[in-house]
Image (cartoon, grey):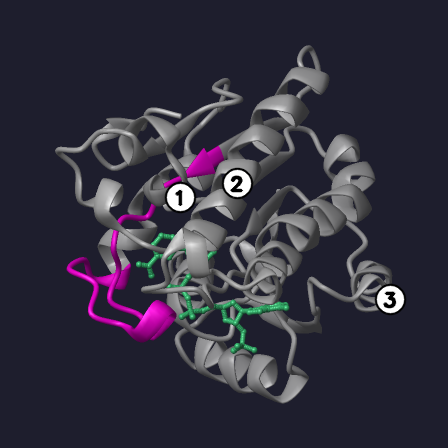
Amino acid sequence: MTINTLITGADRGMGYELALELGLKGQSIYVGSRNLARGQAAVARLEAAGVQAQAVQLDVTDHESIAAAKTSIPNLDILINNAGIAVDHETKPSELSLDAIRQDFNVNYFGLIDVTQVFLPLLKAAPAGRILNISSAVGSLTLASDASTSIHKLQASGYQASKSAVNMFTVKLAAELEGTPVTVNAVNPGWVDTSFGGGGGNRTVQVGVARTVELATSDALTDSGTFSDIDGIVPW
Ligand SMILES: NC(=O)c1ccc[n+]([C@@H]2O[C@H](COP(=O)([O-])OP(=O)(O)OC[C@H]3O[C@@H](n4cnc5c(N)ncnc54)[C@H](OP(=O)(O)O)[C@@H]3O)[C@@H](O)[C@H]2O)c1
């Protein structure tokens, strides 16, 4: 049976790498991209690599775009909420503009919830639906309040809060879906070398997606409501 997987923000960065790796493992990939031409270009590269993929226009901040995307996806087993932005790097919390915080939340939190709610009926109809929310350790309140960590010093509190909020949504939706076959988990990729946030990450995209690939391909996933990375559980 083919596993159908939708990845938001899959035209580049970790979303593209997830499409490639999961596609090479036999999953049929819906490449969500807010710019259809970029999504189609990604699909051409994926198909050349032997992956079964289809481009889907999907701007996570636009409800009509999400609803339209659903009409071209009849079955869905895995939703990977990967699309994300960070517009408030290197800004003190005391000086952070509300507009910057809203931009981060519109994509990373409200967009993620809208996409999840629209596709949840398809995931519930699947034999074992999985929702994987790409979060970040910088959203961990435990790590951010620990003065010995680099996250304590990081100044991106709008972005960080949006990922803390994603973690809360993960926990609450997992609790709501307890007793159903649908699992909901958050993943920390680590600091990954994409163009995200100005670039410069110390992990390759392959390492960055490794935990998500594991969760998307493991047999009979029972974990739900967790936050993890390649090293194990990440503190909330
Ligand atoms: N890189 C890191 O170090 C790091 C660390 C922790 C967590 N993360 C998280 O990992 C995820 C992927 O990051 P990345 O490093 O791969 O970033 P990236 O290379 O900048 O890619 C981000 C993707 O999100 C898409 N996107 C942005 N706004 C969107 C919208 N409104 N609707 C749909 N798609 C949208 C982008 O599309 P366009 O091509 O149209 O711009 C792009 O495909 C994000 O959630 C990020 O927060 C990254």
Circles 3 and 2 in contact, beta carbons < 8 Å:
no
Q: Quadrant of the C terminus?
A: top left
Residue at image location 65% in from the left, 42% down from the top: 77
Give the numbered dot on residue 107. none
Number of labels in the image equals 3
Q: CA distance from mark 3 to mark 2?
A: 22 Å
Q: Nearer the viewer, mark 3 or mark 1?
A: 3
The kind of residue on which mark 1 rests is Thr
At numbered mark 1, what does the secondary structure look like: helix, strand or loop? helix
Circles 1 and 2 in contact, beta carbons < 8 Å:
yes
The kind of residue on which mark 3 rests is Glu
Q: Residues within 10 Å of mark 1 (few under 14, many from 20)?
A: many
Q: State the residue position of label 2.
A: 132
Give the numbered dot on residue 64. 3
Q: State the residue position of label 1.
A: 212
Residue 60 on image: x %, y %:
69, 62
